[in-house]
Amino acid sequence: MRDRRELDDLLRRLNGKGYGAYKSLEGVWRFPKFVLFVDHVQGDPFATPSRLRVRVPMEIAGIPHEFYRNKSRKTALEDFLVRQLARWIPKVTKGNRGSGHSGRFSVVAFGQCILHRTAVWVTEEHVEAILSVGLPAAGRRILGHEAAEMLLSELPELVRRALFFVNLDKAALREHVACGEDADALREQLAERGLVAFVAEGAILPRESGVSDRPLGEGAIPFEPPPSLSVTLERPNRGPIRGMGIPEGVTLIVGGGYHGKSTLLSALAQGVYNHIPGDGREYVVTRREAVVIRAEDGRFVCGVDISPFISNLPNGTDTRNFSTQNASGSTSQAANIMEALEAGAKVLLVDEDTSATNFMIRDERMQELVVKEKEPITPFLDKVRPLYRDHGVSSILVMGGSGDYFEVADCVIMMDAYRPRDVTDKAKEIVRKYPLRRRPEGGERFGSIPRRVPDLSSIRPRTPKGKLKIRASKMALQLGSSVIDLSRIHQIAEVPQARAIGYILAYIAENGRRFAGKPLAEILDEVERALEAEGLWAFIPARYGDLAAPRRFEVAAALNRLRTLRLRDGKV
Ligand code: ADP
Ligand code: MG
C-alpha cells in the first residue's frame, strides 16, 4: 500500500500534466488515521467528480458500540455521519479552484428522513464514507499542488471533524439515534394495538412551503389528539408518548377546506419513514405497508386486473388484463390500487384533492340517470369495506365533499382549524337520520389481487451500446433508453431512493436465474430480503455513495410505469 508521502510526491509530479494523468491516483493510500481508496477518477474536470472512499479503523473513530448495536441505531448513526460530512465540507474545504468541478468536495444530498444510505457505513471494524471530489485543473492541466492541499490537508481534516467520535456533538448524535430507534419501536407497536398510524401529541405536521419539506415555523399549530382516540405507546429511549391512534378499518378525515386535512394525510404518508430530530414528525408513524393512492391520468398500465373497479368498457376492453399507454383518471386510480395490493399494501391513503371524482363516488341521482349497465366504474365507496373484510386492507380517506362515505366508515375524524375531533358518533347518527337510498354496486366480494409475472427481458437498463444507464431526478428515472415518470409517486422521499430503484430494477432484469418466471410479489420479497441482509450493496456494481433505500412499493411503482414492461405469459 502506498502511503501519504508517496501521494504527495505523485501529485506534485503530476502538476501541469494533462488531466488523464490523474488516473494514476486510482488505488489504495495509507494515511496515519485512515485508508484512502481512490475508486474512480473522473475523465475531465467537467465530468462527474471522482469517487473517493475513506476507511477509518474503529479504534481511531472511537464510536461506542451502543450507537450501532441494532439496525435502527446503526441506520440513524450512519445517517447522522452523512449529515456531519455535509456540514463540515463548506467549513474545512476551500471549494472551487479551477475549471469545472475542480476543488469541490460533496456527499450525497439528503432531506428530512433518516434512511439507510450508502454514503457512510459503520461496522465493528471501521467507519467508511464515500465522497465526491472534483480533482482540480486549470483548463485541462492538472493543478497538482492544489490537489495535494485537498487530499493531504482538507480531506484528513474533514474526516477528523465528521467521523471521529471525540469531535462529534454527542447530544445531537444521541438524539438522532434515539429518535430513529424510538420511531421504529412505535411503528412496531401499531399492529399489535390494532392501529395503522400514530400521530404524537405536539407533532408539527405543516411544512414550510409547497416546495420545502422543513417544518412550518411561526404559526404552526401543534397536533392535539382527540381524547377518544388517544393512545399511549412506549419508546425505548424517551419513555411513553401519547398521541392519536388511527385504528384499522376505514377512516375518514373530514372538515372544511383549508382546515388541515391534506396536511394530516401527507404526514401519515411520510410516516412510513423516520424523521430527523426537529422535523416535527419524529413521532408520526404509519405502518410500513401504507401506500398513497391517487389518480394519475396519462400513465402507462401493463396487464393489470382492474375488474373490481372497472368493467364493461365501451370499447369491449378486457379489464381483467388492462393495458394502456394513456390511462384515464379513474382507470389510473383503479390500476394504482390494484398494483399497490399486488405489491403487498395493507393501508391505502387517498385524498379527494388528487382523486378522480367518478372513481370515488356515484350518488343516488346519478344512479337513476346513468343506469349501472352504462357505467363501467364501481366507485371506491362500494369497495372500501369488502377490501378490508376480504383482504384486511385498511383505508384512510380525506373526504370533505361527500357524506356517502359515513355509511362505510369505522372512524370519522374532523379537522377543525387544524385540531382533530372524533366525530364518528355524530356521523353515524346522521346516517340513521338520513338513510341513503343509493344502491350499493360493488357486489359481496372485493375480487382477487393481481399476480403478474413480468417478462424480465422487457426491462432494459442498458443503452444499445450495452452501457448501464441510470439517471434519477425528482421527477423521473432514466433506465437505459426509457424514462419512467416519478412525478406522481408521493412516497419517494429523496432522489437517492429513485437512483436506488434504478439499480434494483437493473438487478432484477439481469438476474434472470433468480427472478425469471416469478410473480412480481415474490420478486419484491426477494429484493426486500437482500436489502435486509446486505443493504443496498446487494444491487450495485461498485461502491457508489449516492443511494438511499426505497420501499418495495416504490420499486414496484417505478416498474409499473416503465413503458417497455411486458408480462411473461404473452399477455399485453
Ligand atoms: P385542506 O386539505 O383541509 O383543505 P390543507 O391540509 O391543505 O387543508 O391545509 C391548508 C393550509 O393550512 C396549508 O397551507 C397548510 O400548510 C396549513 N396548515 C395545515 N396544518 C396546519 C397546522 N397544524 N398549523 C398551521 N398551519 C397548518
Ligand atoms: Mg386538501
Image (cartoon, helix red, strand yellow):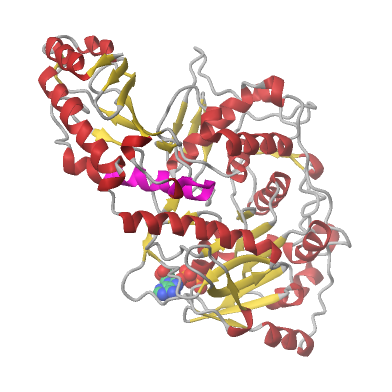
Displayed quadrant of residue 551: top right
In front: 189, or 506?
Answer: 189
Relative image position of residue 477 (x, y in whole percent): 49, 35
**Residue at x 64%, y 45% (from the top left corner):** 327
Classify 291 as above or below 371. above
Left or right: residue 559 compared with residue 238: right
Relative image position of residue 96 (x, y in whole percent): 15, 33
- Pick out the residue farthest to the front: 59
In front: 136, or 191?
Answer: 191
Left or right: residue 30 compared with residue 294: left
Classify 188 as above or below 459. below
- Pick out the residue farthest to the right: 444
Q: Quadrant of the N terminus?
A: top left
Magenta span of residues: 67-86
Displayed quadrant of residue 164: top left
Give the number of marks: 0
**Residue at x 69%, y 62% (from the top left corner):** 191
Q: Main secondary structure of the magenta part?
A: helix
Left or right: residue 93 compared with residue 74: left
**Residue at x 46%, y 23% (from the top left corner):** 542
Relative image position of residue 384 (x, y in whole percent): 75, 63
Q: Does residue 177 belong to the magenta stretch?
A: no
Q: Is residue 286 visible?
A: no
Q: Quadrant of the C terminus?
A: top right
Displayed quadrant of residue 318: top right
Q: Does residue 83 belong to the magenta stretch?
A: yes
Q: Is residue 370 visible?
A: yes
Relative image position of residue 442 (x, y in whole percent): 83, 62
